[in-house]
Amino acid sequence: MTETVDTRSAPQTATSEPAGEPAPNASPAPDLELDCRGMNCPLPILKTKKAIGTIEIGQIVKMISTDPGSVPDVAAFSRRTGHEVVEQSEGGGEYSFLIRRTK
């Protein structure tokens, strides 16, 4: 018995979002990703600080860490430097941060 697969393209549906605009609740796209998995304090913050220095004001660094201490460290770093933590999440033993350079 053979299976029939419809290869015609699906009809296009209109969306309320303008082309190229992210969905309202979508995470902003990072301009630089930094993998700090397996590193312990203070390395994730030191690498994040260095990475932020390489991007333009308004751009975003995504830092991924496996160190639970990175959660309070990133919060303290943000308060001290004024850079904005746009998003923070945890899952599967990993901590992910989106940090926007503000100055």
Image (cartoon, grey):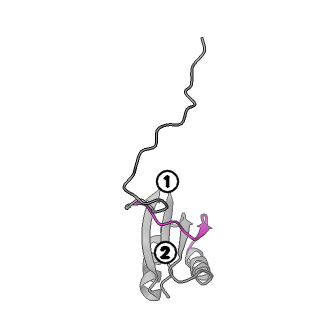
- In the rendered image, which quarter is residue 3 located in? top right
- Residue at horizontal 51%, vertical 60%? 94
- Up/down of 26 relative to 43, above or below: above
- Residue at horizontal 53%, vertical 83%? 57
Does the magenta run of residues contain 39?
yes
- Closer to the eye: label 1 or 2: 2
Q: Which residues are magenta?
A: 26-41
Does the magenta run of residues contain 72?
no
Query: What SS does tag 1 mark?
Result: loop
Residue 85 spot, x, y in % from top left: 43, 75
Q: Is residue 69 visible?
A: no
Residue 8 spot, x, y in % from top left: 55, 32
Identify the mark at residue 1; answer none if there is no mark: none
Identify the mark at residue 99; answer none if there is no mark: 2
Residue 16 spot, x, y in % from top left: 36, 55
Along the viewing direction, whichever of 9 and 73 lies nearer the viewer: 9
Q: Which amino acid, mark 2?
A: Ile
Query: What SS does tag 2 mark?
Result: strand
Mark 1 and mark 2: Cα distance apart in space: 21 Å
Q: Main secondary structure of the magenta part?
A: loop
Q: Earlier in the sequence, mark 1 or mark 2?
A: 1
Q: Which residue is mark 1?
A: 92
- In the rendered image, which quarter is residue 51 located in? bottom right
Along the viewing direction, whichever of 9 and 90 lies nearer the viewer: 9
Q: Which amino acid, mark 1?
A: Gly
Crowding at mark 1 (Cα within 10 Å: few <14, some 14-19, many 20+): few
